[in-house]
Amino acid sequence: MLDGRTLVRRRAGLRLWLSAGWLTLLCLAALLAPWVAPKDPLAQDLFLGRMPPFWMTGAEPGYWLGTDSLGRDVLSRLIHGARVALTVALVAGTITCIVGATLGLLAGFLRGWVDMVISRLIDIWMAFPPVLFSILLIAVLGPGLMSIIIAIVVIDWTRFARVVRAEAMAQGAMDYVASARVAGRGRISTLIREILPNVLPTIVVLLTLEMGIAVIVEAILSFVNLSISTDDPTWGGMISEGRASIHQAWWVLVAPLVTLFLTVLSFSQLGEGLKDRFDPVLR
Amino acid sequence: MTALVIRNLSVRLRKGPPLLRRVSLDLAPGEVRGLVGESGAGKSMIGKAVLGILPPSVEITGGEILLEGTDLLRLPPADRRRRIGASCALIPQDPLTALNPSHRIGPQITDRLVDILGWTRRNADARARELLAEVQIPDPDRVMRSYPHELSGGMRQRILIASAFAAEPRLIVADEPTTALDVTVQKQILKLIAGMQARHGTAILFVTHDLGVVSKVCQRLSVLYSGMVVEDARVADFFRAPRHPYSAALLAATPKYTDPTAGLNPVPDAVIEAVRAEVAAFDREVAHG
Amino acid sequence: MPILRILLLRLLTTVVTLAGVAVIVFFVIRVVPGNPIAMMLPPGATEADIARLSALYGLDKPLVTQFWIWVSGVLQGDFGTSISTRQPVLGLVLGRLPATLELSVMALVMAVVLGGAAALTGTRYRGGRTEGAIDVANGMALSVPDFLWGLILILLFGVLMPVFHISGRVTPSLDLPFSTNFYLFESLIRLRFDLWADIVAHMFMPALALAIPLAAIIGQLLKQSLKETMNLDYVTLARTKGYGETRVILREALRNAALPTLTLVGVQFTFLIGGTVIIERLFSYEGLGNMAIDAVINRDLPLIQGIVLLFAVIFTAVNLIVDLLYAVLNPRLRHA
């Protein structure tokens, strides 16, 4: 007999593997997009607009997931869209992580005026509605991949800074840090050699979550037509298109929505799984 | 009729080792029985089993708990709960954690009377005031309106004692009620419990690791080792001549109040070995049916 | 008086925060390329026309002077004039505020009900399959943001099984007798249940989309702290009094377990309000967030400033209210 806890645990392991599997598949699709995509993602065919996917009647052979209103192949656009999504996830996620974690570590460990300044900044940032803030930034920076990455970093660094600051403070109060200091280790050296390794698991978990968030932010910005130029295939753009034609052809929304859903879910399940692995108490 | 009879009560960790090994004991109305043993001997477990508050990681594998002739373990859960609520009570160990921080004292004493026994609010309040006065709490009205954090530990323990006697239970389980208190307060509380017990004629199962406490308040005692009752005796007889070598050693290991300078004698290894062998023999016997 | 000092300090940081928001939003949006005046004039307007209008809106002055004019106006309750609609910003913003407030509060109520139910059920049947199922559902709800839940709801209950409306706040053809913009509230007061039902049918999905992630957070946190509370001595004592499991959870554990959850819900509620921006867009709901996005697209600088500042005020107010609530609900703090 399995009791509830082992069942949940076992399922957690399964979820971790499924998530990793989906993300690997996406990476492969993104890397090999020009070779694996069955059609040109930009090729329009106005006679084949809004074709349903293969499981519905009236599907056009060769267009597995149907077409959008301009007759472009949905599957090919999804595969090419993975490039933008994963680039944003990896690049924006990593930079946000580095910026936020560094500020959080400094604030939590050095305390004093550094902490004061950073904490006030976090307060101010928390008083902005993030979506509105990102839309504003894109309006300032102009559309494009680079702008999206900058906007994500500028807005989301507080996610890392808040948590890492608290962790660094907690770690800094522990005996081992005091003894390292007594043993003659410098402040920065203590920070890097003693505190950082203990905060690292938290940072890694936050990073995976942030990657999922970055994908969503890109989709949201595409949705309000502020992301990359509307021709380039992005998941958010496809969702926007699907939302617009939802009464005529609801299925256009389904494929990008499911893809986005699975991707975000995978990133966060990966994070949760890693958290369980790292946390000796939970394990 | 006896207040409580426990027969062959066996308890174990789910799919784990036994915690109580066919424990049997009885309690006459108005009698106080001490349950002594080292920590982990299972003395608290007996009280918890009687009150139906065993942790979920633990299961009862056999035996009977007869409360005034009714086997609690055979009752449907809801009936058992109400039955225990109506005729048993607990005096908990730590007065600092046993009162709900977000309720006032008054309702914490009267809740059982009103919700389970169906008293009117007014009667229950009057009863609570009466009991608080009986446990020598000055200004009961003010205390009933207070929150736990506004009161001292000794005060809270008095309140918990008052609350335990509120419904005139037949049986009270006192789970090391003085362990968490200052030595000076301990004596008063012990006296208070003894006095309340005498006036109300309540049977008490008194869980303690302190034989000195047993000598003051109990008429009989059970000595436990590893979930097994190794001796069941009248207190007077026990202190004169313990029958089991382990309980004799336990008695020798207790500091004497009359002679605090006498050295402590830890329980000798040979005695421990012998009683362990006894437990092992018991387990083998059970295993072979 | 330590309490007074804490309160003063709290107010001071709030002021600093709001000032920071004001500075940042003012200068950031002035970097936005594209002249808002040029956008509002018909094509063929001369340079002189543009200059004249710029002067009218004060956009020809140096940045610092503009900032000073704006701030002194704001302190006197004048938020300037919207460039795209030529109406006072304050009136526009306050006109939309009720819609967003009603949406946020409805979402909060949904989140508390759903999350609370999940936590209580999970605690009642802890250690079993029911708890496992609730954990899995919570995990899913938490991982996926409101934007995606909104799209999923639109697809499921707006199109495939059309139960709810997917756009707007109320059916446009209806005749509204309201004197305030709190439609949901006022329709109840006026006992116009027909209108109320229509408004709820419009709000239900956007509110639910906002509520799902918060419900999951409440569910997880509350369950965890309920389970910890259930092992405490006073809960055990209550059990010996004859109370059943459900009673014990509700009467003894819930209130104490809810306190730590409450502080976190405060922060999370501000996230929820922030989420209204995109959710309102998704459901074409005529609230502040939708207006904000239009303002950005139209480069309506005074309006953007006003909306962002209002959001910041709401966020800090929510945090303040939660702190006060915490003090009221915790007897230990109340008497300190």
Image: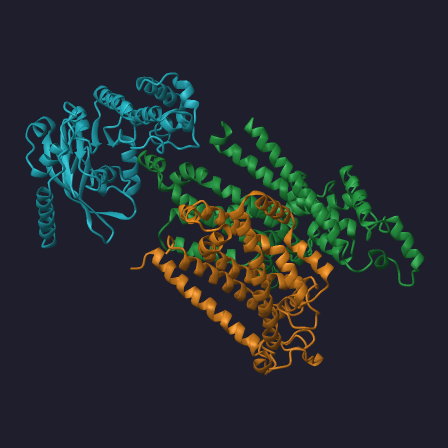
Chain colours: A orange, B cyan, C green
Q: Residue A240: image x %, image y %?
A: 66, 65
* Drawn side of residue C73 relative to residue A118, left or right: right
Q: Quadrant of residue A11?
A: bottom left
Q: Residue B271: image x %, image y %?
A: 9, 42
Q: Residue A148: image x %, image y %?
A: 65, 63
Residue at the location (55% across, 29% down)?
Answer: C2
Residue at the location (64% across, 78% down)?
Answer: A41
Please, which residue is most extreme toward the front here? A184
Residue at the location (12% across, 32% down)?
Answer: B251
* Drawn side of residue C272 relative to residue A227, left or right: left
State the residue in front, C131 or C204: C131
Q: Residue C79: image x %, image y %?
A: 78, 43
* Drawn side of residue B138 relative to residue C64, left or right: left
Question: Visible in this render: residue C175?
Answer: no
Q: Quadrant of residue B24?
A: top left
Question: Visible in this render: residue C253?
Answer: yes
Up-down relation of residue B40 to residue B154 (above or below)? below
Which of the image's four quarters has the N terminus of chain C?
A: top right
State the residue in front, B60 or A42: A42
